[in-house]
Image (cartoon, rainbow, N blue to C red):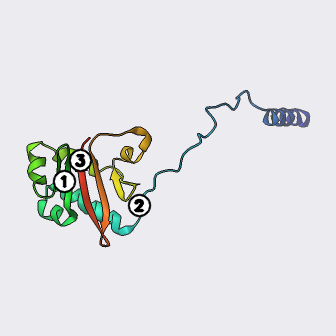
Amino acid sequence: MKRFASLLLLIAMAFASCKGTHKKGAADKKPASTKPAEENTEADFEAFVNRLRKAVSAHDMNTLATMMTADFGYSLNPVKQGPGVYQFWDENDLWPEVEGIVNEKFLKKGEFWVSPPQFADESLNYTGYRAGIRRVNGSWKFAYFVNG
């Protein structure tokens, strides 16, 4: 019995020390990545984004007005900013689009925190709807929601 146990132990050790048939290839290597986009973890930013999401979901224009910059951009072609944003969103049925975009993650791009994350990646050439937030006089402000 001792011989059988010893034999099993030797076989187990032999198999454990063998290299497997798996060859380390390109699929196993981690891709060389560029610097990952920065994610904002500041408590005041998270609180602002949560308030923004709730206000957009509720179509609470009064709260949104306090959260937007005075020159809020809402169209690139033709350029439109400031008053008229809610009418523009209503006429073009954009509320669901605004809600979808502000519910995505915000990443750093230049002086703005932008959503969706694809817009922050220059290599993707993202041209869809996007939102931008930035600090103005120490407070976070919703600066734009545009397409194109």
Which badge, 1 or 3, comes first in the chain's sequence? 1
Which badge, 1 or 2, comes first in the chain's sequence? 2
Mark 3 neighbour class, 10 Å CA radius: few under 14, some 14 to 19, many 20 or more: some
Which badge, 2 or 3, comes first in the chain's sequence? 2
Q: Is residue 123 left or right of residue 93?
A: right
Where residue 83 appears, x then y in whole percent? 11, 58
Label 1, label 3: how many angstroms apart (C-alpha)?
Answer: 18 Å
Q: Amino acid at mark 3?
A: Val
Q: Amino acid at mark 2?
A: Asn
Looking at the figure, which quarter contains the C terminus? top left
Q: Which mark is residue 109?
A: none
Label 1, label 2: how many angstroms apart (C-alpha)?
Answer: 22 Å
Q: Find disc 2 in the rendering and name its residue.
A: 40
Answer above or below: position of 108 versus 97: below
Q: Is residue 93 left or right of residue 146?
A: left
> Disc 2, disc 3: CB below 8 Å?
no
Answer above or below: position of 22 versus 104: above
Secondary structure of the residue carrying tag 1 is: helix
Q: Find disc 3 in the rendering and name its residue.
A: 146
What is the residue that sits farthest to the right in this orientation? Answer: 3
Label 2, label 3: how many angstroms apart (C-alpha)?
Answer: 22 Å
Residue under the image location 26 percent in, 43 percent down: 129
Where residue 137 appears, x then y in whole percent? 30, 72
Mark 2 neighbour class, 10 Å CA radius: few under 14, some 14 to 19, many 20 or more: some
Label 1 or label 2, whichever lies nearer to me, is: 2
Mark 1 neighbour class, 10 Å CA radius: few under 14, some 14 to 19, many 20 or more: some
Q: Amino acid at mark 1?
A: Ser
Residue under the image location 35 percent in, 57 percent down: 112
Q: Find disc 1 in the rendering and name its residue.
A: 57
Secondary structure of the residue carrying tag 2 is: loop
Number of residue marks: 3
